[in-house]
Amino acid sequence: MTASTSTTEPMHLGVIGVGVVGKAHIKRLLADTSPARLVAIADADAEAATTVGADLGAPVEASVADLLARPDVDGVIIAIPSGLHADVTIAALDAGKHVLLEKPIDVTVDAADRIIAAEQRSGKTLSVVSQRRFAPENEFLHGAISSGRLGNVTAANIEIALWRTQEYYDSGAWRGTWALDGGGALMNQGVHLVDLALWLLGDVEEVYAHSGLLAHERIEVEDTITITAKFTSGALLTFLATTTAFGNLPLRVAVMGDGGAAITLSEKLTHFHSHDGQDVPEFEPADQQLGQLTDFVTAASTGTRPLVTSTQARAAVAFIEAAYTSARTGQPVRPR
Ligand SMILES: NC(=O)c1ccc[n+]([C@@H]2O[C@H](COP(=O)([O-])OP(=O)(O)OC[C@H]3O[C@@H](n4cnc5c(N)ncnc54)[C@H](O)[C@@H]3O)[C@@H](O)[C@H]2O)c1
């Protein structure tokens, strides 16, 4: 049997990891709107895979190795604990599969580099989930900055202030550990907005941070972190990530320049002011995750670059690693 990718057949995907996020990927692939076909699912916990397969009506493979050995699987979506991403992703790429990998790419720059080396030798497509880039408002903001509508960007103020209960951290042994979660409010939740910050503002020269564990217990990592950073462009950033904001606040992205300024609150553009006029399009509601899945499938089928690349996902982890080093040492740190 040959791999099924062709211009007429939808791409055939498997899902590895059937936890909270894996289930959402499975449902998306089973929906009428899916741009790809679900072939099978697998999990290190075979019983969990069997249960989820029966609940959702998805075919189940006995193991991840069995799923990766199938020639009719073109690619896989990987949704397993973050600190295990590299080994499973490398196995998938080495088996000749395209990979859509959940965020973060892994929890260290070294692990990201191992993934990127495997991606390069495989010639397959790898993208890392960062669904907020697929919100039309964020696409608009990216375009507005790139085309100079904000003038010379001078500063940004970004905030992800969520609430996570103690039960959330207690719900999986991997949560809140350095080895498998890779960090707390910044690595797990904040990585989405770190990726947005770098996408909007470019490369980072230096990071300085303070962190604390202020409203949770029995975890190794921070639940609150404040960061200041300087971009190579000269622009300055203040960034807050916390899981201690009871009731959750809207995600806030404010970008300022000498020709304009914009604010989004949980992806809604609440302020836009530009030297060339205040025109903004009508934003249609969009399914961000479906947008990213479609982008990945298109890139893998046509050999084009996905919107979120492995190098960009590595840069987000390098920023986070630098912030953690800074918080620990009290020194400013240049991301690797
Ligand atoms: N994009 C988003 O908005 C978003 C949201 C939440 C979580 N995530 C990411 O999704 C990933 C999974 O998070 P979750 O909340 O679904 O976790 P979870 O604990 O609910 O599920 C993880 C699953 O992976 C399985 N697993 C563990 N090791 C495995 C291995 N080596 N091979 C195969 N299966 C293995 C577990 O048995 C479990 O079923 C994490 O990387 C997390 O950062 C992304």
Image (cartoon, rainbow, N blue to C red):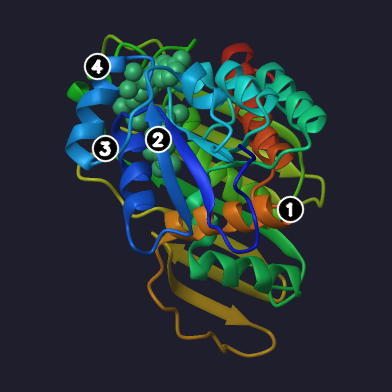
Name the residue beneath numbered marker 3: 163
Mark 3 or 1 closer to N-term?
3
| Amino acid beneath label 1 | Arg
Location of residue 231 by image quarter:
top right
The secondary element bearing badge 2 is classed as strand
As measured in the structure, the alpha-carbon distance from the residue carrying label 4 to the one carrying label 3 is 31 Å
Q: Tell me the kind of residue under disc 3.
A: Trp
Is ligand 1 less than 8 Å from the beta carbon at label 2? no
Compare residues 232 and 122 and report the one nearer the observer.
Answer: 122
Q: Tell me the kind of residue under disc 4.
A: Glu
Find disc 1 in the rendering and name its residue. 305
Side (left or right) of 292 relative to 21 = right
User: Could you say where residue 322 lies in the image, as x and y percent from the top left?
Assistant: 66, 24
Looking at the image, in which quadrant does ligand 1 appear? Answer: top left
The first of marks 4 and 3 along the sequence is 4
Query: Tag 4: Cα neighbours inside 10 Å, few (<14), some, or many (≥20)?
Result: few
At x 25% / y 21%, what residue is drawn?
48
Q: Quadrant of residue 310?
A: top right
Side of 145 relative to 289 (left or right)? right
Residue bearing mark 4: 47
Label 4 element class: helix
Foreground disc of the pair 2, 3: 2
Camera-nearest residue between 121 and 209:
121
Mark 2 vs mark 3: which is more N-terminal? 2
Q: Say which of 77 and 135 sits in front.
A: 77
Q: In the picture, which quadrant includes the C terminus?
A: top right
Look at the numbered disc 1 and give the secondary structure of its residue.
loop
Rounded to the nearest angstrom, the CA distance separating label 2 from label 4 is 15 Å
Question: Does the residue at mark 1 contact the one at mark 2 (Cβ under 8 Å)?
Answer: no
Which residue in the structure is indicated by mark 2?
Answer: 40
Cα separation, mark 1 vs mark 4, equals: 36 Å
